[in-house]
Every structure is written in structure tokens, then in C-alpha cells.
Image: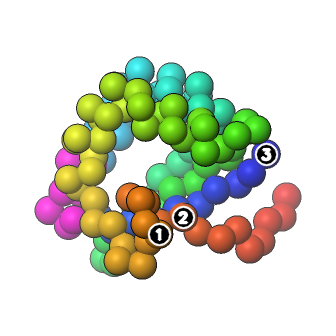
Amino acid sequence: MQRMGMVIGIKPDRIADYKRLHAAVWPDVLAQIAGSNIRNYSIFLREPENLLFGYWEYHGTDLNADLAKMAEDPKTQEWWTHTDPCQSPLASRASGEQWAMMEHVFYTE
């Protein structure tokens, strides 16, 4: 299992929209997340900096293949047409990233 962290900005005028969307995530999107071997997915909001922090645990064996499968899913693509306009990707993100992936540096139980 891999613990994954990522960060992205959120447009202040779209915070309410983003919260509304995530209060009722579409069942097909949730099924795709689970089908991509992602568990314990959480998104946290930090104001007034207007940052979103995402955390999830990957339980598969081929992360790139599972993420590609998710990106090809029509319902997930449709979902992103609603969520992406709310976000402000970081300038420092890697090429091809929407959310900037973070390095895992510490864990304790």
C-alpha cells in the first residue's frame, strides 16, 4: 500500500461549488475510484490560503495503469468538467499534473 498526498489551489469564489459537488459525489465516480485501487480518499480545505490537500491510499500494483484507466472513464471525465474549473493548479506541478503530487516523508501509527 502506498500513501499518496497531493495539493492544488482552489478559486475563492468556487469554494461553495466545490463543497456542494463533494457533498454528493456521483456513484459512478466513487466506483471508478474504488476500481482504481484507491482507498481512504480524503480532501481537506485550507482557508484563507485556498489550498486543497488530497490524501489517499493506493492498494494496487500498477499505479500508472490504474490512473490511466480512471482518466479514460467517461463519467470521471464529465465529473472533472465540474471540478477542474474550481481549481487553481500550482505553477510548480509536474508536467501533465492537475494536482501536484507530494513526497511522503513521515508516517506513524
Tag shown at residue 94 = 1
- Spatial CA distance of label 2 from label 3 is 16 Å
Mark whose residue sits in front, 3 or 1: 1
* Residue 82: mark in rendering: none
Q: Position of residue 106 (x, y in %)?
A: 77, 71
N-terminal-most mark, 2 or 1: 1
Q: Are marks 2 and 3 in contact (CB under 8 Å)?
A: no
Residue 54 visible (yes or no): yes
Q: CA distance from mark 3 to mark 1?
A: 23 Å
Proximity of marks 3 and 1: CB atoms separated by less than 8 Å: no
Left or right: residue 63 versus residue 94 is right
Q: Nearer the viewer, residue 19 or 78?
A: 78
Q: Which residue is mark 2?
A: 101
Amino acid tagged 1:
Ala
CA distance for labels 2 and 1: 8 Å
Query: How would you rate the neighbour count of disc 1 (Cα within 10 Å): few for under 14, some for 14-19, many for 20 or more?
Result: few
Dot 2 amino acid type: Met
Quadrant containing the N terminus is top right
Please name whichever residue, 13 or 92, is drawn nearer the observer in this view of the structure: 92
Residue 51 visible at all? no
The three-letter amino acid code for the residue at tag 3 is Met
Q: Are marks 2 and 1 in contact (CB under 8 Å)?
A: yes
Determine which residue is flagged by label 3.
1
- Residue 99 drawn in magenta: no
Residue sticking out furthest to the right: 109
Main secondary structure type of the part rendered in magenta: helix
Over which residues does the magenta segment extend? 11-18
Q: Dot 1 lies on which element? A: loop
Quadrant assignment, res 104: bottom right
Q: Quadrant of residue 35?
A: top right
What residue sits 36% from the left and 73% below the top?
Answer: 90
